[in-house]
Image (spheres, rainbow, N blue to C red):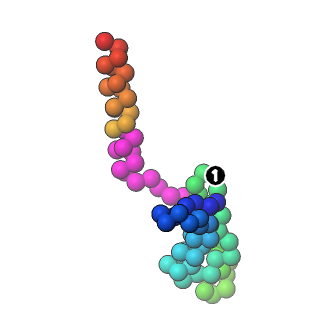
Amino acid sequence: MPSSKSDGQMIDLTEWLELSFNEAAGLNSASIVLNDLGQIALDTIMDDGTRGIFLLTPIPEPSLYALMLAGLGALAMVRQRRRF
């Protein structure tokens, strides 16, 4: 799943996520997959040699809901003005 950086270069988000997670958690991940629901499936090998499989679901920030409500409010105001 490629994405563009601010300097215009393309990066692979799966590869970036795997490197970032390995560095932050100190784990050796076998594979990381991003699915269509925005979830992160992580297959990793723990320090003691055991295998762990995790499904991470990002939680939206409260500001996302505030922006969505503000946008819906603005649409309602525009609709109300056009009605009269």
Would residue 54 be visible to someone looking at this image? no
Q: Specify whether residue 46 is painted magenta.
A: no
Dot 1 amino acid type? Asp
Indicate the position of residue 42 as horizontal and vertical percent values: 63, 68
Front-lying residue, 8 or 55: 8
Question: Residue 12's quadrant in the figure?
Answer: bottom right
Estimate the x, y position of residue 27 in percent, counting from the top left. 58, 81
Residue at 57 percent across and 71 percent down: it is: 16
Q: Visible in this render: residue 63?
A: yes
- Looking at this view, name the residue that lies furthest to the front: 8
Provide residue 79's location: percent of width, then percent of height.
37, 21
Task: Please give the name of the residue rendered at 31% of the width and 12% of the height, measured from the top-left corner.
Answer: 84
Q: Residue at x 36, y 43 (%)?
A: 67
Res. 78 image quadrant: top left
Mark 1 is surrounded, within 10 Å at the Cα level, by few (under 14), some (14 to 19) or many (20 or more) other residues, namely few
What residue is disc 1 on? 36
Instruction: Give 57 or 81, whichever is nearer the viewer.
Output: 81
Q: Foreground residue, 6 or 49?
A: 6
Left or right of 75, for residue 9: right
The quadrant holding residue 73 is: top left
Q: Which residues are magenta?
A: 54-69
Vertical placement of residue 25 versus 69, above or below: below
Q: Quadrant of the N terminus?
A: bottom right
